[in-house]
Amino acid sequence: MARKFTLVLLLALGAPLAAPAAAHAQKLVYVVRHAERADEPKRDQQDPSLSAAGEARAARLRDMLANADVKAIYVTEFKRTQETAAPLAARVHLKPETMPLSTDAFTAALKSRHANDVVLIVAHSSTIPAIVKALTGHAVQVGDDDYTNLFVVVPATQTVSTIRY
């Protein structure tokens, strides 16, 4: 698993070197769905916290990205995205910012505010496809019961890779 992640990470980080110098986008964007909800499978709470499995997944995300030079973390207004990002945010001493509801406004702000940064976005199965499409032009799907995908996006080359974690 670590070798596979390292290979994908090296490929993703090396891709911007082949991009034209005029490209104006982030160095690298990690896009992940929030971890498992505490109210699964009923989904009977409006703003649930993470389950024990979700807390463990958030800790794995922290461990995976702790040395990735993340400079900004974006979450939604919901606890589950904030709690997914919290372990990494604490480790790298960043305060997560709440992203706007408009994908277009968010990705435009992301490109201007973090043009040369590594960024983590913690979102939802319903919003990740639009975010990845806006950054790369590529379509991705996230199932309602899938919490395992970490999308590695290189906006400068419009590439996206998926790591299961």
Image (cartoon, rainbow, N blue to C red):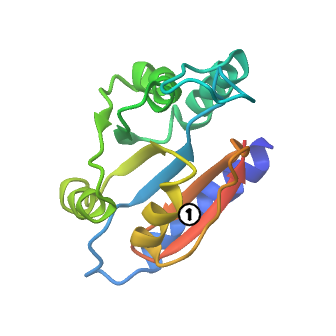
Instruction: Give the residue furthest to the right.
Output: 1
Tell me residue 59's x, y (percent).
Answer: 62, 23
- The answer to whether residue 45 is visible is yes
- Which residue is more in the foreground, 97 or 28? 97
Q: Secondary structure at mark 1?
A: helix
Q: Quadrant of the N terminus?
A: top right
User: Could you tell whether 51 is left or right of 121 in the image?
Assistant: right
The amino acid beneath tag 1 is Ala
Image quadrant in which you'd find residue 156: bottom left
Rendered position, 151 above or below 123: below
Identify the residue at image location x=65%, y=30%. 43
Q: Position of residue 22 (x, y in %)?
A: 25, 81
Q: Where 145 sits versus 19, above or below?
A: above
Q: Residues within 10 Å of mark 1 (few under 14, many from 20)?
A: many
Residue for point 41% across, 19% down: 90
Label 1, on which residue?
12
Where residue 49 appears, as percent x and y from the top left, is 54, 19
Which of the pair 47/72 is nearer the observer? 47
Q: Is residue 13 visible?
A: no
Instruction: Give the residue displayed 30% in from the left and 61% down from the top.
Output: 107
Asked where in the image residue 151 lies, by quadrant, the reply is bottom right
Residue that appears at 44% across and 58% down: 28
